[in-house]
Amino acid sequence: MFSYIVRRIGSMIPSLLLASIIVFSFIHLIPGDPAQIMLGDQATPEQVQGLREAMGLDRPLYVQYGRWLSGVVKGDFGTSIFFHQPVLHVILDRAETSVLIAVFSMLLIILVGVPIGILSAVRYNSRLDQLFSGLSMLFASVPTFWLGLNLMLLFSVMLRWLPTSGFPSILESGDWSNLRYLVLPCITLAAPNSALIIRLTRSSMLDVAKADYVKTARAKGLSEGAVNIRHIFRNSLISVVSALGFTFVALMAGTVVTETVFSLPGIGRLVVESVLRRDYPTIQGIILIIAFLYMVINLLVDLSFALLDPRIRYS
């Protein structure tokens, strides 16, 4: 197991290097000049050129890439062109919102999606199963912006139970009651993702239920509950855990639509704002960190397979 982990971590290095080259190259293909955007339309060509030289944008791309990569290796992702702050500091300022949304949305997804998926598989082809299947298809198809706006209309405007938008930082204020600002965004994100987990759990359990060892377990006289949980559900967890892992990273990476609807200062909105402002260092830093998160989560998911299925061995 240890040697496998070391090899996987070692394989991340060339993958991240390739990702950095692709990200850096494509970001600089975006039309528009950061210096021109910062100075405005009234700036003279001399002023724009002077700012480009000051920011190093007049140098060849391979020189710019080399300087940026050497900084990344040292933990320095550069300075944001728009915020005039270190990129890592800008990302961490927005990370609080995205991390909290991802964590609480995942809790809702697991608490809703997995139990309903189990119940739907156990009651296969019953009216309850058809009801859950229909609702899961409905919520998987509903646009998040439409769901978010309607939740806001119901719980914020009509009932006045929850705030409409924004999120005051908990780290700065120390007020944990600010979590109420994230209730509606988390529900908005959890609804379609829970629907997908319901369908995945149901289909995985139905596939496992056809296996011979399940028939043997029933023939030995085990209770239906023991068969469903210990044999069917446990052996169907691999695909469910894999889907949950990548869902968590997607939520961490930022959900632009939901953050825009609820005016949340998260990573998703930061990406969009940085693209519009041609803030190259910030975009590059965010995408590289997201790529690293995907690799780490993928490794953790693979390692969890050995815990879920003792037959799996890494060598």
Image (spheres, grey):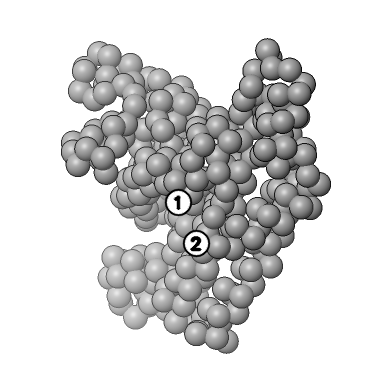
Q: Residue at x 44, y 31 (%)?
A: 259
Q: Which class describes the residues within 10 Å of circle 1: few (<14), some (14-19), or many (20+)?
A: many
Q: Residue 238: horizontal and vertical position, in percent? A: 48, 66
Q: Residue 65: horizontal and vertical position, in percent? A: 72, 52
Kindly report the distance in space between the C-alpha atoms of the residues bearing marks 2 and 1. 9 Å
Secondary structure beneath dot 2 equals: helix
Q: Would residue 144 appear left or right of 74 to someone viewing this image?
A: left
Note whether residue 149 is visible.
yes
Nearer-the-camera pick, 140 or 38: 38
Which numbered tag is attached to residue 248? Answer: 1
The reply to whether the C-beta atoms of the residues labelled 2 and 1 are less than 8 Å apart is yes
Which numbered tag is attached to residue 119? Answer: none
Tag 2: residue type?
Answer: Ile
Q: Which quarter of the image is occupied by the C terminus? A: bottom right
Nearer-the-camera pick, 263 or 196: 263
Q: Residue 124: horizontal and vertical position, in percent? A: 42, 51
Number of numbered markers:
2
**129 up-or-down from 19: above or below:** above
Which residue matches tag 2?
297
Note whether residue 112 is visible.
no
Q: Residue at x 52, y 68 (%)?
A: 299
- Displayed quadrant of residue 157: top left
**299 up-or-down from 220: above or below:** above
